[in-house]
Amino acid sequence: MGKKITRRARWWLILLLVLVCWALVHVVYVVVDGLHAYKGKADIAIVLGNRVEADGTLSPWLKGRVDRALRLYREGQVPRIMVSGGRGKEGGHYPEGLAMKQYLVAHGVPADKIIEDNDGENTYLTAKDFLPVADSLKVGSAIVVSSFYHITRAKYIIRKLGFRNVHSVSSDTFFRDDIMATPRDCIAFYKYVFAY
């Protein structure tokens, strides 16, 4: 009886070690993939949303993403920008897409070069909302813009929905919270693998 318990405990330990190693490899991949910036051109940049203040001010996380997309536009890497986020919580919160568009317009991007999406409550919905935009504008390539830890999951779901030619750049701003967000986003990746 004791041997059986020992053998079972050993198998559980091996399984645990395999899972830990897998998680570490995945985290390293997400960091490397997220920090690798695409240098070429594309038809559009897709900015994934984040928190917006009640007055429409972008949170530091979101501002970093939008500033990176603005740089892509100014440097001629993309002729258009799609800004996608949620409608915000009830009680005066600003729609994320609207706030991002207003920020970009205030920084010199013509309004007709910006596609505003306020129904992108999560990464999957942003990807889903992008497909008809890509179809109507004859978009053949895209650059996802988000925080580095979010890039792998965002590209994965866009490709899973059928749009293959997707690249990425990450925000140039980094925060202490990114350390915890990275493993959390790795877990969310598998949710997207199995749920969508």
Image: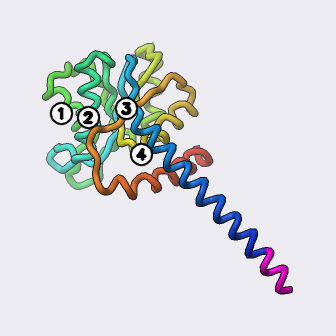
Circle 3: is it few (<14), some (14-19), or many (20+) Cα within 10 Å? many
- The reply to whether the magenta stretch includes residue 20 is no
Q: CA distance from mark 2 to mark 3?
A: 11 Å
Residue topped by disc 4: 149
Q: CA distance from mark 4 to mark 1?
A: 24 Å
Circle 2: is it few (<14), some (14-19), or many (20+) Cα within 10 Å? many
Q: Residue at x 47, y 55 (%)?
A: 183
Q: Which residues are magenta?
A: 1-7
Q: Amino acid at mark 2?
A: Val
Residue 50 in percent (x, y) is at 31, 45
Q: Earlier in the sequence, mark 2 or mark 3?
A: 2
Residue topped by disc 2: 66
Q: Amino acid at mark 1?
A: Tyr
Q: Earlier in the sequence, mark 1 or mark 3?
A: 1
Residue topped by disc 1: 103
Residue topped by disc 3: 169
Q: Are marks 2 and 4 in contact (CB under 8 Å)?
A: no
Q: Which SS class for mark 2?
A: helix
Residue 92 in percent (x, y) is at 20, 51
Instruction: Give the main secondary structure, helix, strand or loop, of the magenta stretch.
Output: helix
Q: Earlier in the sequence, mark 4 or mark 1?
A: 1
Drawn side of residue 10 relative to residue 119, left or right = right
